[in-house]
Image (cartoon, grey):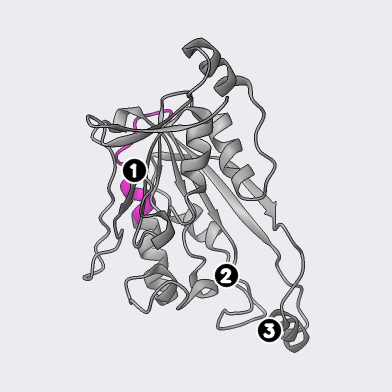
Amino acid sequence: MSGTERHNHSDEACSQGSSEGGTAGQELGAARTSRPDSTPHVGIVDNLLYLFTEPFGIVVDPFGGGASTITVCKKRMRRYWVSDRKVPEKLKHEIGYREHDLVAPDGTVTISGPSRWGDVQLVYLDPPYWRQAEGQYSSDPTDLANMPLEQFNAALSGIIKGYAGKLKAGAHIALLIQPTQWKADDRGWPVYHDLDMIAAAPKRLRMKYHIICDLSTQQSNAQQVDATKETGELLVRSRRLVVWEVV
């Protein structure tokens, strides 16, 4: 496809990626058959869209970050509902990128999304990796990265449960998260957030895949090296991808 163009879709309150060149049939063909991007992280999102969505379906991403989901949705002709608790200044011009905090000051989980939940085919969750991101984005106690572990688990599982209650059967929820080790209370015992969320998932979700995703680099920083020397334990250097199907 020769380019991208942003559009507002007032009914869904979503945004849709489109191409400036080629016919509609050519656009759809490219969106269906083009191979996933191999760039780390972007490649994960691209593969998820390739496997679990169709052109013009809606993708929801409430941890929008650097807007990679928007980029891939435009490429693959998906509508998107992307938000974050604080939209980065350099991305505030991006049409369809919204500010929304999933956790209210009282700790209540408040999910947001399009009016047509039946058109949502994928919810992609790439939250802050608990203490690994502590203080990086804010000092707000309602920021997932700044919460005690019990509160973090309750909030994240509440977010997953909230989206599961909105989606129709056949839609998918994907969670990408890294275990916390060298910043955990006991550095010798990694906190496997993926396993915590699998255990807490509502019955309406059936786990379809549980995948280990290598990091783009296996290099470790000085603090991580010191932690392994202190504990004598292996260092966990991967992220975990959990995909559930709504049944």
Q: Nearer the viewer, residue 226 or 246?
A: 226
Q: Of callouts 1 and 3, which one flags the residue occurring earlier in the amino acid sequence? A: 1
The residue carrying pointer 2 sits among few (fewer than 14), some (14 to 19) or many (20 or more) residues within 10 Å by Cα, namely many
Q: What's the CA distance linking mark 1 and mark 3?
A: 38 Å
Q: Which residues are magenta?
A: 159-170
Q: Which mark is residue 231?
A: none
Q: Of callouts 3 and 2, which one flags the residue occurring earlier in the amino acid sequence? A: 2
Amino acid of disc 2: Val
Q: Is residue 225 left or right of residue 165?
A: right
Write down the residue under mark 1. Answer: 96
Write down the residue under mark 2. Answer: 191
Q: Which residue: 41% across, 27% down?
A: 57
Comparing labels 2 and 1, the label whose residue is closer to the camera: 1
Residue 85 lies in quadrant:
bottom left
Amino acid of disc 3: Gln
Amino acid of disc 1: Gly
Q: Is residue 2 left or right of residue 160?
A: right
Write down the residue under mark 3. Answer: 223
Q: Nearer the viewer, residue 62 or 174?
A: 62
The quarter in which the C terminus is drawn is top left
Quick check: 73 above or below 100? Answer: above
Q: What's the CA distance linking mark 2 and mark 1?
A: 34 Å
Q: Secondary structure at mark 2?
A: loop
Q: Which residue: 39% across, 62% down?
A: 89
Q: What's the CA distance linking mark 3 and mark 2?
A: 17 Å
The residue carrying pointer 1 sits among few (fewer than 14), some (14 to 19) or many (20 or more) residues within 10 Å by Cα, namely many
